[in-house]
Image: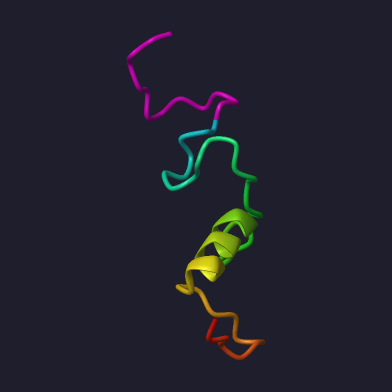
Amino acid sequence: MSERIDETSNSEETSNDVPYYLPGAPQPSREPGRVSRFLENLLRRRGSLVPVTRPRRRD
């Protein structure tokens, strides 16, 4: 395991591609403006992300 981080490396390992991924979390689609389903669900549970298609629920 090399400690060196090569920013220009184009290896197949892209785990550091987007910094806010958690290990083991599902990868989001590459569509612009779309967060991963994992983050979407996490934020929705915390109430930070309210989908525009549904009214906010006060639980």
**Which residue is the extreme one toward the left?**
4
Whether residue 23 is situated above or below residue 46 in the rendered picture: above
Q: Tell me, what colour scheme is on the image?
A: rainbow
Secondary structure, magenta segment, majority class: loop
Membership of 3 in magenta stretch:
yes
Q: Is residue 1 left or right of residue 15?
A: left
Position of residue 46 measured from the top left corner of the image (x, y, whole percent): 48, 68
Residues 20 and 5: in front is 20
Instruction: From this view, report whether residue 59 is shown above or below residue 32.
Output: below
- In the rendered image, the quadrant that contains the C terminus is bottom right
Residue visible at 53% across and 35% down in the picture? 23
> In the picture, residue 11 is in which quadrant?
top right
Does residue 11 show up magenta in the picture? yes
Kindly identify the residue that appears in the image at 48 percent across and 74 percent down: 47
Residue 42 horizontal/vertical position (percent): 54, 60
Image: magenta residue range: 1-13
Residue farthest to the top, as pictured: 1
| Residue at 52%, 33% in the rendered image | 15
Q: Quadrant of the N terminus?
A: top left
